[in-house]
Amino acid sequence: MWLRVFTAFFAFVAMDCSGLKVMVPSQTVHGIRGQALYLPVHYGFHTPASDIQIIWLFERPHTMPKYLLGSVNKSVVPDLEYQHKFTMMPPNASLLINPLQFTDEGNYIVKVNIQGNGTLSSSQKIQVTVDDPVAKPVVWTYPSSGAVEYVGNITLVCQVEGGTRLAYQWLKNGKPVCTSSTYSFSPQNNTLHISPVTKEDIGNYSCLVKNPVSEMESNIIMPTIYYGPYGLQVNSDKGLKVGEVFTVDLGEAILFDCSADSYPPNTYSWIRRTDNTTYVIKYGPHLEVASEKVAQKTTDYVCCAYNNITGRRDETRFTVIITSTGLEKLAQKGKSLSPLASITGISLFLIISMCLLFLWKKYQPYKAIKQKLEGR
Ligand SMILES: *[C@@H]1O[C@H](CO)[C@@H](O)[C@H](O)[C@H]1NC(C)=O
Ligand SMILES: *[C@@H]1O[C@H](CO)[C@@H](O)[C@H](O)[C@H]1NC(C)=O
Ligand SMILES: *[C@@H]1O[C@H](CO)[C@@H](O)[C@H](O)[C@H]1NC(C)=O
Ligand SMILES: *[C@@H]1O[C@H](CO)[C@@H](O)[C@H](O)[C@H]1NC(C)=O
Ligand SMILES: *[C@@H]1O[C@H](CO)[C@@H](O)[C@H](O)[C@H]1NC(C)=O
Ligand SMILES: *[C@@H]1O[C@H](CO)[C@@H](O)[C@H](O)[C@H]1NC(C)=O
Ligand SMILES: *[C@@H]1O[C@H](CO)[C@@H](O)[C@H](O)[C@H]1NC(C)=O
Ligand SMILES: *[C@@H]1O[C@H](CO)[C@@H](O)[C@H](O)[C@H]1NC(C)=O
């Protein structure tokens, strides 16, 4: 590992054994089209020098290197064809390219020659890329109306109007989306296909687009996914609930609430099952039962939830038992007794029982004697 670090370090430093070093901070420089690009170069040597020569060359793959400009001491000799584009201030070897165009993409070679006690020479190569910055992406959802879970598919398309060398990435709730059994990407990754959609796919999606000079993220998109009903349950504002059985005080009104998770919201209907007949007594998520109006003491009800987009329904049965007030109160009190109170109660009960037993035993012999006396 250390060997690799060392090799990487020396890649930036071309060192001649006689002491001339030419250094570039980065061997790859990413430029923006239309802007100025500065290619920094440092060099150092340890011998007395009479002449310092700097030469810049440009090469593209499969072409001959082109001379751009050169200098001896402080005088620059440009190639007249490029003189407006490239600037150098010797003995500073750094090069300024202005303005940068797509055609300026390629390798820039800088060569430094030192004339002194013999001639020292060293060079470096810098790779330059030219890009347009990324414009803000826009995400389109197909179908825009949404999809039903386990039935429909959703396709998200990321569209970018400006920028070169674009790399697309999809984020869900800020985290990268990976290929899975339901997620797939187009070859360029600019399209995300979810097939089939499920409730778990609901979330905040965005498209992140990067290139060497910039990155931009789209606005958040929340695809519409229709699902449910799930987790249907009935609750009441008062009364005792044990499983699907509600115990209500006689004379009390009780409000039932039916709820299930679904999108769009369910339509609810309530059915009372009496005398073998079933009929809808109310629509909506709430049902009020006034216990004095209930003919029977035990009545079965059903709450139905229906999602009119997914076409799925669910229903739950429950029983309402009307009790007399006293029993209800006793049950409530019994529930609220503390363990200490229970122990005291049981102890009292035992003591009283013992006393009664004692009295009864005492009474029995007397009764027997009395019977004997009466028999005679
Ligand atoms: C470059 O400068 C050195 C001293 O600074 C001088 O001796 C030499 O003649 C100069 N060379 C040219 C070509 O002007
Ligand atoms: C070369 O010139 C640039 C400004 O044009 C400056 O920032 C840089 O430090 C100079 N390099 C050296 C080695 O003097
Ligand atoms: C020039 O270089 C030679 C050998 O490369 C060395 O012997 C000599 O001392 C050097 N002269 C100076 C002035 O550095
Ligand atoms: C969803 O995609 C699957 C396969 O990718 C396809 O078989 C199915 O017909 C698509 N469903 C819809 C509603 O487009
Ligand atoms: C999605 O974004 C909305 C606001 O834009 C936020 O309220 C919600 O919590 C986010 N959901 C997740 C799962 O991050
Ligand atoms: C597409 O994205 C996947 C993972 O998100 C990545 O592995 C792959 O390299 C990307 N392909 C392209 C062409 O960007
Ligand atoms: C579906 O139910 C919603 C209420 O949950 C209602 O607003 C909508 O009109 C219904 N659509 C149809 C086609 O019945
Ligand atoms: C209730 O319905 C069943 C069959 O659905 C029938 O056999 C029975 O006689 C009915 N009872 C009453 C009281 O209507």
Image: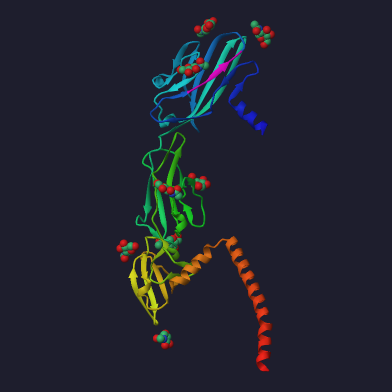
Q: Position of 375 compared to 136: left or right?
A: right
The quarter of the picture where the C terminus appears is: bottom right
Left or right: residue 315 versus residue 376 is left
Q: Quadrant of residue 160?
A: top left
Which residue is at the far bottom? 376
Specify the quadrant of the image occupied by residue 44: top right
Q: Decide: is 265 above or below 132.
A: below
Q: Quadrant of ligand 3?
A: top right
Q: Which residue is drawn at the image coordinates 46% and 23% (left, top)? A: 38
| Part of the protein shown in magenta | 39-45
**Image side of residue 93 versus residue 35, left or right:** right
Residue 163 image point, x, y percent: 40, 38
Foreground of the two, 305 or 345: 345
Residue drawn 36% across the image and 68% down it: 288
Q: Position of residue 66 (x, y in %)?
A: 47, 25
Q: Is residue 267 visible?
A: no
The spot of residue 64 in percent (x, y) is 49, 28
Residue 335, compared with residue 219, is above or below; it is below
